[in-house]
Amino acid sequence: MSLESIYKNSPFKVPKDYFEMFDAGFFNELELKTKVNKTGFKSPDGYLNEFNVSIPKTSKVTNLRKLNKKYSFYLSGIAAAMVLMFMFSWPSENTQEISIEILENYLINEGDQIEALSNILTLEDLNELSTTEVSYYEIENYILQNTSVETLLID
Amino acid sequence: MKDDAKLLTQLQSNNSKELAFKILVKRYKERLYWHIRKIVISHDDTDDVLQNTLIKIIRNIDKFKGDSKLYTWMYRIATNESITFLNSKAKRNQVSNETLKENALQNLVADVYFDGDEIQLKLQKAIAQLPRIQQLVFNMRYFDDIKYKDMSAILETSEGALKASYHIAVKKIKNYLIAN
C-alpha cells in the first residue's frame, strides 16, 4: 500500500483549505517575528519584587437605633406629610429639566458605575427599558406604597 | 494546573485565605502585569489596574466555581479591568478611545519605562490600529504564546474566531510595517 493511498483513506480530516491557509499564516508570522518579537516595555527596577496589594477595608456596618414606639406614630405622620409636601410643592421645572452640564458631569464622574451596569444589562434589556413608559402617577403611587417612612427618618 | 487546584482550595478557605492570596500574588503578579501593560501601555496605569484586578480576584474568589482554569479566570478579570479602565479614562479626559490610544503612543516615545527601538515602537503603533479584540488576541498569542483554548476561555470567543482574528492581525501588522 502506497503512502498516498494511506493518506487518501485516512479517517482524519482537516478543515477546508487548511494547508493553503496555513502557509500564508505561518510565513506571515515568521517574517514578522524575525523583524520584531519583543514589546520594548519595561517595569521600574525592583517594582515586581516589591509589589504589594493594598486591599481597602470594607466600610463598617453601623447598627440602626430603634425608634421609640411612643413617638413613632407621630414621627411617621410628620415624615409622610413632609414627603407629600416635597412631592407636590417642588417647582415642576426643577424636576423636569436637568442641565446638560450636570448630566455630563454625572456621566463622567459615575462612569465606573455605568460601566459596571453595562456588564449586567444586555442590549435587549436597554432597548426594553427605553421603550417602557412610566407615568408620573405610577411613580407617585410606587413611592407612596414602597417608601419606608422610618428609614427616611433615620437618614 | 495541579498547584492551582490546591491553591484555589486554600483561597476559598477562611483559615488559609490570606497566606494563599500571598502565594497567588507571587505566582501571578508578573504575568498579569505584562498582560495588562500591553493593553493600557503606561506603567502607572498598569500598576492601578493590577491592584484593582488582584482586589477583585480576592473579593470574588469564593464565587469562582472552577468551571475554567484559575489562570484564565484571572486573565479574564485583568482584561475586563483594563478595558474598563481605558473606557473610564477616555470619559474622564473627555476624549475618544482612539485619541486616548494615540496620546498613549505619543507618550511612549518619552516614556522612561519603554526602551524599545524604532521597529518596536512601530509595532506598538501597528497594534494600536487594530480593533480591540484583534489587539488582545495578537498580544496574547504573539508575545505570550497563550493557547487558543485558554484564550477562548479568557475572551469568551470561539477558538475558530480567535484564530481568524490572529491571522488577520498578523497580516495587517505586516502590511503596516511595510507601508511605514
Image: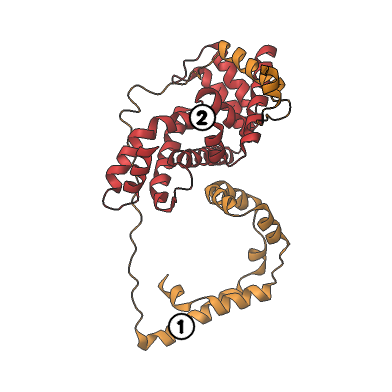
Q: Residue at x 61, y 12 (%)?
A: A31
Q: x, y (%) of residue B14?
A: 29, 53
Amino acid type for the residue under numbered disc 2: Ile
Q: x, y (%) of residue B163?
A: 63, 30
Q: Secondary structure at mark 1?
A: helix
Question: Which quadrant: the N terminus of chain A?
Answer: top right
Amino acid type for the residue under numbered disc 1: Ser
Q: Residue at x 58, y 30 (%)?
A: B137
Q: Which mark is residue A127?
A: none
Which one is nearer the viewer's eye here, A45 or B77?
B77
Badge 2 is on which residue?
B146
Check if mark 2 and mark 1 are on a common chain: no
* Chain A: colour as depicted: orange
Q: Secondary structure at mark 2?
A: loop
* Chain B: colour as depicted: red
Badge 1 is on which residue?
A76
Q: Is residue B95 left or right of A17 when viewed as pictured?
A: left
Whether residue A88 can be seen here: no
Whether residue A72 can be seen here: yes
Residue A49 position (above or below residue B49): above
